[in-house]
């Protein structure tokens, strides 16, 4: 990958430069530091009702939180002002960002309207979806061949062949696959872990069978243990079963998402690394002329927010209706606001292109 850390020549009134004034935004609590149950609760806050049409009806704590993480819709002009004349690269989480969070993971369907908005965005901007789901699952939900996909928290990366700036095969990659008539090239930095992941998946299914509401999902390079439908009194049981299985697999580790435990290979790879890889692979590693924007709602998205924030080269936008610490710079309440933001971004890009043509 290219070098990014030296790209720090910004004017003081730039939005990215403002990060320097905010200090350290987040100290993520180490897993298990205060016990399994607390980690699970911290990663799975209860949503609150936010009245978008009446800001005065906001929960006062949430309203105070939005002063630290302003709405990306209200700050839209500031964002696009910084993006003027630059290539914007768009990175999107899936669950909770493009689709609502639902009780059954297989029912996390994005709306046709959202699909069309994402399609329009991809026609103007390099666009990638980076998800904890497997690439195949996300593709089946989204059904857009013009996008880049990074599944399994970035450990399974696909890019459309024949498109300018497609993702090329790298070391540890595999052969091209074929999906609905569209060839895709793949980068899989954790391919050697597949047998272990499959084995752990089977064991976790067996161990959690007696826990009402527990669901184990095989996401190819990671295993997701969902406890959204598990009574809270049984959360420690879910954690204990997962921990007991992992004791025999030192090359796997556990991370937390929103009401999900994520079993992943112990490699130096995450959603932030996937962003860096994609920017480099599609020729957008020059931070002087590129503005990456990452939109996500989960704890695992913080790795991407952190990369953009620390390298002073883009914006993280956290999707949340509850106050929580984040490396993101801006916020949106829910997928409906994400859709509004993407619509405005496409409209601005079209207007910018029109002005350039007139000149």
Image (cartoon, grey):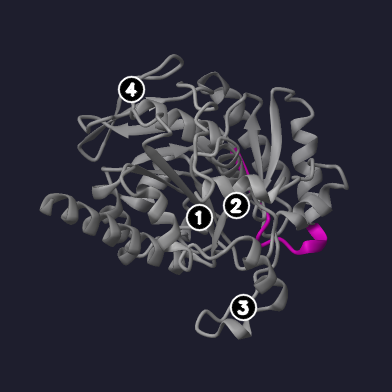
The residue that label 4 is drawn on is 168
Residue furthest to the right in view is 34
88 or 356: nearer the viewer: 356
Quadrant hosting residue 195: top right
Label 2, label 4: how many angstroms apart (C-alpha)? 28 Å
Q: Residue at x 71, y 47 (%)?
A: 23
For the question of whether residue 279 can be seen, the reply is: yes
Query: Which sits earlier in the primary sequence, circle 3 or circle 2?
Result: 3
Question: Start and end of the magenta stretch?
Answer: 223-234
The reply to whether discs 2 and 1 touch (Cβ–Cβ < 8 Å) is yes
Query: Which sits earlier in the primary sequence, circle 3 or circle 1?
Result: 3
The residue that label 2 is drawn on is 298
For the question of whether residue 127 can be seen, the reply is: no
Label 3, label 1: how many angstroms apart (C-alpha)? 19 Å
Quadrant hosting residue 194: top right
Q: Position of residue 49 (x, y in %)?
A: 61, 78
Q: Residues within 10 Å of mark 1 (few under 14, many from 20)?
A: many
Q: Which mark is residue 95?
A: 1
The residue that label 3 is drawn on is 49
Verify whether residue 166 appears in magenta.
no
Q: Which mark is residue 51?
A: none
Q: Residues within 10 Å of mark 2 (few under 14, many from 20)?
A: many
Label 2, label 1: how many angstroms apart (C-alpha)? 9 Å
Residue furthest to the front in view is 12
């Amino acid at each position: 990958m290219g070098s990014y850390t030296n790209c720090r020549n910004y004017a003081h009134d730039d939005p990215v430069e403002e990060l320097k004034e905010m200090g350290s935004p987040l100290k993520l609590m180490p897993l298990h530091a205060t016990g399994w149950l607390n980690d699970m609760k911290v990663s799975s806050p209860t949503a609150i009702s936010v009245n978008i049409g009446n800001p005065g009806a906001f929960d006062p704590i949430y309203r105070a939180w939005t002063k630290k993480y302003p709405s990306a819709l209200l700050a839209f002009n500031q964002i696009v002002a910084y993006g003027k004349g630059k290539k914007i690269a768009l990175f999107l989480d899936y669950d909770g960002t493009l689709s609502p969070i639902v009780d059954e993971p297989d029912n996390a369907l994005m709306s046709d309207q959202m699909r069309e908005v994402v399609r329009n965005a991809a026609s103007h901007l390099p666009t990638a979806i980076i998800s904890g789901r497997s690439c195949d699952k996300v593709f089946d939900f989204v059904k857009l061949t013009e996008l880049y996909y990074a599944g399994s928290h970035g450990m399974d990366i696909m890019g459309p062949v024949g498109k300018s700036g497609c993702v090329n095969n790298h070391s540890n990659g595999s052969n091209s696959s074929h999906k609905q008539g569209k060839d895709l090239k793949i980068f899989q930095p954790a391919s050697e872990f597949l047998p272990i992941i499959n084995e752990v998946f089977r064991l976790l299914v067996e161990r959690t069978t007696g826990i009402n509401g527990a669901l184990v999902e095989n996401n190819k390079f990671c295993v997701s243990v969902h406890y959204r439908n598990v009574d809270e009194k049984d959360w420690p049981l879910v954690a204990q079963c997962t921990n007991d299985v992992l004791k025999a697999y030192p090359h796997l580790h556990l991370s937390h998402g929103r009401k999900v435990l994520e079993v992943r290979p112990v490699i130096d790879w995450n959603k932030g690394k996937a962003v860096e890889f994609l920017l480099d692979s599609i020729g957008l590693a020059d931070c002087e002329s590129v503005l990456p924007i990452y939109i996500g709602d989960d704890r695992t998205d913080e790795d991407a927010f952190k990369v953009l924030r620390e390298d002073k080269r883009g914006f993280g936008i956290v999707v949340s209706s509850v106050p929580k610490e984040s490396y993101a710079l801006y916020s949106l309440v829910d997928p409906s606001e994400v859709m509004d933001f993407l619509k405005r971004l496409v409209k601005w890009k079209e207007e910018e292109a029109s002005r350039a043509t007139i000149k």
